[in-house]
Image (cartoon, rainbow, N blue to C red):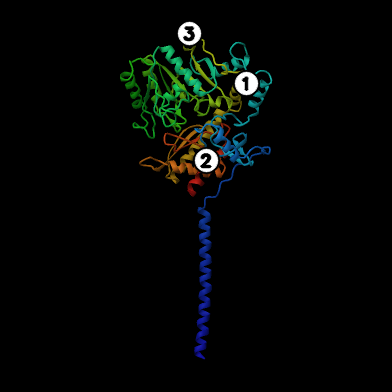
Amino acid sequence: MQRFGGRKILSETNSTISRRWHRCFAQLAQKQEATLRDNEVFLPKMPPFDYSPPPYTGPSADEILAKRKTYLSPSLFHFYSKPLNVVDGKKQYLFDENGRRYLDGFAGIATVGCGHSHPDVVHAVINQLKRIQHSTILYLNHVIVDFAEALASKMPGNLKVVFFTNSGTEANELALMMARLYTGSNDIISLRNAYHGNAPGTMAATGQSNWKFNVVQSGLHHALNPDPYRGVFGSDGEKYAKDVQDLIDFATSGHVAGFISEAIQGVGGIVELAPGYLPAVYESIRKAGGLCIADEVQAGYARTGSHFWSFEAQGVVPDIVTMAKGIGNGIPLGAVVTTPEIAEVLTRRSYYNTFGGNPLSTAAGHAVLKVIEKEKLQENAFVVGSYLKERLTSLMVKHEIIGDVRGRGLLLGVELVTDRQQKTPAKAEIAHLMDQMKEHGVLIGKGGYYGNVFRVTPPLCFTKEDADFLVDVMDYAMSKM
């Protein structure tokens, strides 16, 4: 009896222990679940948007890609492992063939208030298209001169004569030719990390041949890039400027045609030139009889927020300013602005541009400028851009892969590295992250000499909510990498 009684007691004891263990495991599981819930990075939600594109009935992305490979240049490339078929756009958003919405963090060209398909720009283009769309050389048309006047009003100093072109490449080629004609010299100095276009002169001025063919032209000299992050002199602009003076002294006859640079390099990886660089360089160039050319194709037109033109942040006034891309909000349009004295050199021969400054493009350009002013987009670029840069900078504490955050306004760069001390470019990682961000609804660009820099250049109508979504998606993608 005692034996059976002992078994009964033992059985009851085991049952009690078992229940206690179950309760213990349940409590532990609840704690683990709570911890995971607290630490989990939840997938960000895109801000709401009241627009649905009409149904798309065209060919699929695969069909377009197949035709592209057959009929278009093999030099063309695309972002993402699975290319995106963009069929519609509204404000700061793009839509694919299935109607899915994406936040456009890499618009660049789409500048104004509604970024894509701004009604004011659309109305101006359609209205002009109904009247006349061509003829700029032999006849008069007020649309062209009205835009030229408005554009000149945004320039400092005596920069008030405008030459219209179709692209930034044409604008920079014209600027280089004008500098050579005006000075009688052939020597041009540009930067090693520069990007200025696709024609022979601008490709020669483009310092890095891995971006373009290494076109060799006589008289082109490349100076040290004043890169505060990777440059040999850090943020000391005057030390970099001495290299330009050395080129003048030892690589030329002491007399130069000009110096061309961006104040913030776009394709080069959103590199803001070291403080004090342009004032020192401009002084050296002008002492050598040369002209100073500011390439504002990517950084100009209110994008930096703090100033309308990016060169203004360095306190200089160029002799020639070039622009394109965003000034037409997607319509092919470029411009060169200079002084009456320098402009006079083109009267030595008959210079004209068949399509440059056509009424259709200049109508679009004038509408873009009006929208920037009416909707206070320069102020928005400053406010939202500053907020976005702060949020991107805050990610550096969390993610070692971020080596540097830089830029102004809505022209920002995030450089990715696998080792912060060595600054080893994270080339494979950035491709993976771009794909992941696209899958979660954010489109973003890349650039830099090593192709490891996120280029964040959204439409100027970007909001703080958009900024939060972009940064949250980047954070999520990096956390899941």
Q: Amino acid at mark 1?
A: Leu
In the image, 224: left or right of 359? left
Disc 2, SS: loop
Q: Amino acid at mark 3?
A: Arg
Label whose residue precedes the other's in the sequence (1 or 2): 2
For label 3, the residue is 348
Q: Which residue is identified by label 2? A: 80
- Give the residue at the far left of this rendering: 250
The answer to which of 380 and 367 lies nearer the viewer is: 367
User: Based on the displayed image, in which of its 4 quarters is residue 333 positioned?
Assistant: top right
Q: How many marks?
A: 3
Label 1: state its secondary structure. Answer: helix
Q: Is residue 153 visible?
A: no
Figure check: 328 above or below 92: above
**Which mark identifies residue 360?**
1
Q: Examine the rendered structure and indicate whether residue 275 appears above or below residue 59.
A: above
Mark sitting earlier along the chain (1/3): 3
Answer with mark 2 or mark 3, whichever residue precedes in sequence.
Answer: 2
